[in-house]
Each structure stands twice: as C-alpha cells, then as structure tokens.
C-alpha cells in the first residue's frame, strides 16, 4: 500500500501489497494461516438474516483462497442508546448459526458504541503454504466459473427504496446467506489457477483485479453470466446502487462492453455484491466437468462466465 513502510517478512505469502482477498502467513513448511476481516451496516431488515449474511461474507475470503476457516471473532458497532439491544442479539444469533453451519468456532470479539449499527467478523483459517490460491495467476486458455448469480446489490437498493418484491428479497437473501464452502472444496480438487470472491467491486471490478498488471486479459460471456431475474427489471427502472456507478467509473479504462450487450446487463456486471460467489480460473479441460459437479452438489447457479485470453493484455471485453 502506497505510503506505508512495510517491513519485508519471508513468511508473508499474501499481504497488503496488492488486492488479495485475505492475508496468508506461513507458520511452517506444511501450515499457513489465512486472516481476513469484514463488517458493514445492515442491508436487510431482518437482524437475524443480517447476521447470517455478514458471517457468510466474512468467511468467503478464506474460501476464495482455498482455505478452511477455523475461528472467528465478532466486530460490533452499536447505538446502544437509540436501538433495541434485541436487534443486536438477533444479529449475533444469525452470525453464530452461520458459523455453526461452517464448522467455525466463535472465540471472542469486540464492541464499541457508535451512532450507526455495523457488524461483521474477523476470521482465521488454515491452508498448506503451497496450495494457496491467489486472485492472480490465471492463464490464457483458462475458463472462468462463477458460482452465484449477480444482482443482490440492485435488489438491496430497491429494498431500501421500498419497491422490492418479497420474492426478489427472498432470492437475494438466499443467495447472500449461502456459504462458498462447497464451491471452494470442489475448486481445490482441480488445477485452479486463480480465484476471488465477487463482492463490493462487482464482477467486472474483481475480474479486473485478477488481470491488472498481468500479461493476460479476460472475455466475459454475457450469455453465460447468471443473474437474479428480478434484478433485470429493477435495473431497467433505475434501481442502481451508488457503488455500481463508482465501480464502472473506476474500471472504465479496462473494460469494453460490446454493443450487443443490453444496458441492464452491463449494469448488473458492475453491481456491488454482498457475500457473492467465487470467480475462478480453471483449465479448459477441467472446467466443464467442474461446473457439472458443482451443480450436482447443489451449487445450481454455477456457470461458465468467460475465458482468459492472451490479448488484449490487462483488459476485459464483454461479448
């Protein structure tokens, strides 16, 4: 990170020098720890569901690196004088239940009084030092697999504006609370070259991180990307989060959207996600069978979303 004097450490496998999903530190030749932290304000009305979403989101960075999360610590900012403490209790219960589902132990946490409610977790996991999956490393010829549909940011924006249907909110919620554990475990059975989880920067933002400064580019198949159907209509009616516009502006110099790609889909591709799916680069010879296996294992929206190409380097084309 520019401006910081980072002391070199030979045991740091992934640090803050570039935009990796989590930090990785080598303990010995056979063991490394993965560390990540994330928290945010409520994005759904139900505090229990908010807790589930926040926990699934925090765990996702460990899964994206190919690791196994082991412990977690709560992070809470809460307006104790103006908000019912039962809301906090329900949120913590939702997070804890999601940790139980993941087989992760809650070992502590920290809370502060704040004017705005925020919740998340710090998560620690483990992995073999030689099996860490970075978000760079994709090779020309790889196929890109996306494991969850897009559109949760658009639906959450519509929810805040009071125009989202119950069905739309239910679909978005089911997507956000789903763990990426099975997708990560299946990913580690093949020769994965790179992986990231799709969150606040949207699909195209995180795909940009995968190729930034490398000698490869990406082609996204607009016909292959899965999205929540309700997000299409909402996008067409202008229910676009502010983060979507920021994502588009930030990556405008790297992304080329084909003329045949409808505007609503271009919007969805930049839509900031919460607890989104994994985006992984897999050799072509293994990609189709992996998608098939994922769908058989219940990851029904897993799909081939694009490919890695040798030209143009450092750019993304949506076709």
Image: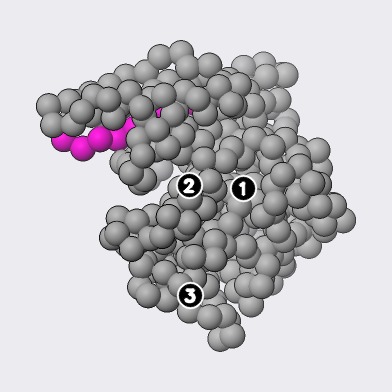
Residue corresponding to mark 3: 264
Left or right of residue 198: residue 31: right
Disc 1 on helix, strand or loop?
strand
Q: Position of residue 176 (x, y in %)?
A: 50, 45
Q: Position of residue 232 (x, y in %)?
A: 49, 70
Neighbourhood count class around disc 2 (C-alpha, 10 Å): few under 14, some 14–19, many 20 upward: many
Q: Main secondary structure of the magenta part?
A: strand
Left or right of residue 246: residue 252: right
Residue mark closest to the camera, 1 vs 2: 2
Residue furthest out toward the front: 166
Q: Reply above or below: 153 against 186.
A: below
Q: Give the residues in magenta.
A: 114-124
Q: Position of residue 145 (x, y in %)?
A: 70, 55
Q: Earlier in the sequence, mark 1 or mark 2?
A: 2
| Residue 299 in view of the camera | yes
Residue corresponding to mark 1: 278
Residue furthest out toward the bottom: 259
């Amino acid at each position: 990170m520019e401006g910081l004097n980072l002391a070199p450490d030979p045991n740091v496998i992934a640090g803050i020098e570039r935009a990796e999903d989590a930090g990785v530190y080598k303990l010995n030749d056979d063991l490394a720890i993965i560390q990540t932290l994330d928290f945010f304000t409520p994005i759904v009305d139900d505090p229990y569901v908010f807790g589930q979403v926040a926990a699934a989101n925090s765990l996702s960075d460990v899964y994206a690196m190919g690791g196994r999360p082991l412990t977690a610590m709560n992070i809470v900012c809460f307006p104790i004088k103006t908000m019912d403490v039962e809301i906090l209790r329900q949120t913590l219960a939702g997070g804890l239940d999601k940790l139980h589902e993941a087989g992760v132990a809650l070992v502590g946490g920290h809370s502060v009084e704040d004017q705005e409610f925020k919740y998340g977790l710090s998560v620690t996991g483990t992995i073999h030092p030689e099996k860490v999956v970075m978000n760079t490393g994709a090779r020309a010829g790889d196929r890109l697999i996306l494991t969850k549909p897009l559109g949760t940011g658009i639906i959450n924006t519509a929810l805040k504006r009071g125009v989202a249907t119950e069905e739309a909110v239910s679909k978005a919620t089911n997507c956000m609370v789903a763990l990426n554990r099975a997708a990560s475990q299946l990913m580690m059975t093949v020769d994965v070259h790179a992986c990231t989880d799709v969150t606040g920067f949207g699909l195209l933002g995180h795909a940009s991180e995968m190729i930034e400064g490398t000698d490869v580019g990406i082609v996204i198949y607009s016909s292959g990307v899965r999205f929540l159907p309700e997000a299409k209509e909402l996008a067409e009616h202008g229910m676009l989060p502010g983060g979507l516009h920021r994502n588009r502006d930030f990556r405008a110099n790297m992304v080329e959207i084909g003329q045949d790609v409808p505007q609503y889909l271009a919007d969805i591709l930049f839509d900031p996600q919460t607890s989104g799916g994994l985006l992984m680069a897999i050799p072509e010879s293994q990609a189709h069978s992996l998608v098939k296996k994922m769908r058989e294992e219940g990851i029904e929206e897993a799909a081939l979303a694009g490919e890695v190409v040798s030209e143009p380097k450092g750019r993304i084309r949506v076709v």
